[in-house]
Image (spheres, coloured by chain):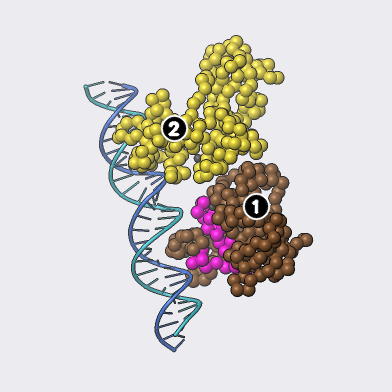
Chain colours: A yellow, B brown, C blue, D cyan
Amino acid sequence: MNSLTEENYLKALFSLADDKGEVGVNELSKRLDIKMPTVNSMMKKLAEKKLVFYESYKPLRLTDKGRREAGLIIRKHRLTEMFLVEKMGFGWEEVHEIAEQVEHIQSAAFFDKMDVLLGYPKVDPHGSPIPDKNGKLVWRQYQKLSQSKAGETLVLAAVLDSTTEFLTYLNSRELRLGLKIKIKAVEPFDGSMTVSYGKHTALVLSSTVTERLLVEPAGT
Amino acid sequence: MNSLTEENYLKALFSLADDKGEVGVNELSKRLDIKMPTVNSMMKKLAEKKLVFYESYKPLRLTDKGRREAGLIIRKHRLTEMFLVEKMGFGWEEVHEIAEQVEHIQSAAFFDKMDVLLGYPKVDPHGSPIPDKNGKLVWRQYQKLSQSKAGETLVLAAVLDSTTEFLTYLNSRELRLGLKIKIKAVEPFDGSMTVSYGKHTALVLSSTVTERLLVEPAGT
DNA sequence: ATATAAAGTTAGCTGGCTCTAACAAATAAA
DNA sequence: TTTATTTGTTAGAGCCAGCTAACTTTATAT
Ligand SMILES: [Mn+2]
Ligand SMILES: [Mn+2]
Ligand SMILES: [Mn+2]
Ligand SMILES: [Mn+2]
């Protein structure tokens, strides 16, 4: 059994992995807000447990086992967020912090029950996919809103930032998942977009925002 | 903020307190399955935090602050058990272990939401009272089934043992809270009782069982 | 009253997870 | 290609929560 601490390292490794599955110690250190020497020794420990490939001065990589265990924790996190929103009436901006704690509960039955009650959901309230019971996670092919062009109509599919601050900002603009958004103009200077959706006919989104929104073409 | 470890000590102190509110180090040590020297030093730490009164070679006592904080953890534990049974479909025999972990979640909103969804319950699935928001807990005046006499009719109000094993035994005999039980006979030799309830006309309960069941007079 | 047993304490050690300071390797800049 | 910067590692320390061994105090039996 992995400790709560180890679980948080695994999750961070998983989510920081680049296309090659590689993560730097420095990067991980910054994400977790834990100093590099601490991270370094934890990586040696996780390597002992066959969860991480570790070689001096080389990037870190999760083993299959490590990736699986990370996926299972993320599964618990996302099922929890979904449960909190769908069954307990929380807003999507309130659930990440709570799930960060609940994900460490050791009880398969607890999360299985959530899964059943929710009807085996495929995505969490932020549009992120929920890994299956083997910890396997697959993202649908979304792109960032920032990469779309004027004239396109898109559906808001997921957010890349689940902090209360960002989601509260989206709430204030009535931006929700599933919303159909039309891009009216893109300002070349700073990348800000003028968009329309629902009752909003001309709302401006900064690139800070459009970088954090994932969309798919309308009608998929 | 208290650590998970400190919270478990506080809960144990609370539940072991005798009529004078006193608890011995040895007693606490056995309950927590932690050796006496470890308990001893933790008591000094909790005394520093003004949660317990500690004097060498004298019994331990929770301070008002300690009792309040213990009560609030027990509140979270019992609300969780109630939520698991009432809203998630768990059996009363499955919830204690899960609640033992969930009680440490730091989120007032999480437990407030449970409270609202449950309609402000006064007791948990095992008949134990749920402390109020100030951590105050009051037991109704129940007595042990073992203290009742032949001929009496009683209502099963609470269990003193929430282990899976005991509750599974009760399930197998269809013994549930709220059940009306008539005592047909008490065997003086070993204190075992022959009782009738529901479809059961003559079922024998050992004193091990009757010691763990709390009852009140039928018609209260 | 004395001896024995039980309960409580002290001292010193361990493992888990964190840190800072100093050093080494790899990468980027000049 | 040499130098500077960034990244990664080692060494040594501290705090937390546990342990055993040895000792002291209090309670119980004889
Ligand atoms: Mn989240
Ligand atoms: Mn977490
Ligand atoms: Mn319980
Ligand atoms: Mn607990």
Residue B108, position in %: x, y?
62, 45
Front residue (pair A164, B197): B197
Q: Does the magenta stretch mainly form a helix, a strand or a loop?
A: helix
In the figure, B220 relative to A179: above or below?
below
User: Residue at the location (56% across, 39% down)?
Assistant: A112
**What's the mark number on residue B125?**
1
Q: Position of residue A57 (x, y in %)?
A: 31, 32
Q: Based on the displayed image, in which of its 4 quarters is residue B214 positioned?
A: bottom right
Mark 2: amino acid: Phe
How far, Cα to Cα, is label 2 from label 1? 39 Å
Q: Secondary structure at mark 2?
A: helix
The residue drawn where x is 36% and y is 38% is A50
Can residue B167 be seen here? The reply is no
Whether residue A45 can be seen here = yes
Give the structural element (helix, strand or loop) at label 1.
loop
**In the rendered image, which residue does mark 2 sit on?**
A14
Q: Residue furthest right?
A: B219
Report whether B30 appears left or right of B147. left
Q: Amino acid at mark 1?
A: Pro
Q: The magenta stretch spans which residues?
A: B1-28
Decide whether residue A136 is among the magenta residues.
Answer: no
The percent position of residue B65, horizontal first and vertical second, equals 60, 59
Q: Is residue B5 above or below residue A136?
A: below
Q: Which chain letter goes with mark 2? A: A
Q: Nearer the viewer, residue A166 or A82?
A: A82
Q: Nearer the viewer, mark 2 or mark 1?
A: 1
Circles 2 and 1 in contact, beta carbons < 8 Å:
no
B15 in magenta? yes
Foreground residue among A158 and A208: A158
State yes or no: Cβ of the residue under disc 1 lies below 8 Å from any atom of ligand 3: no
List x then y, in percent, for residue A145.
55, 19
Above or below, B165 relative to A216: below
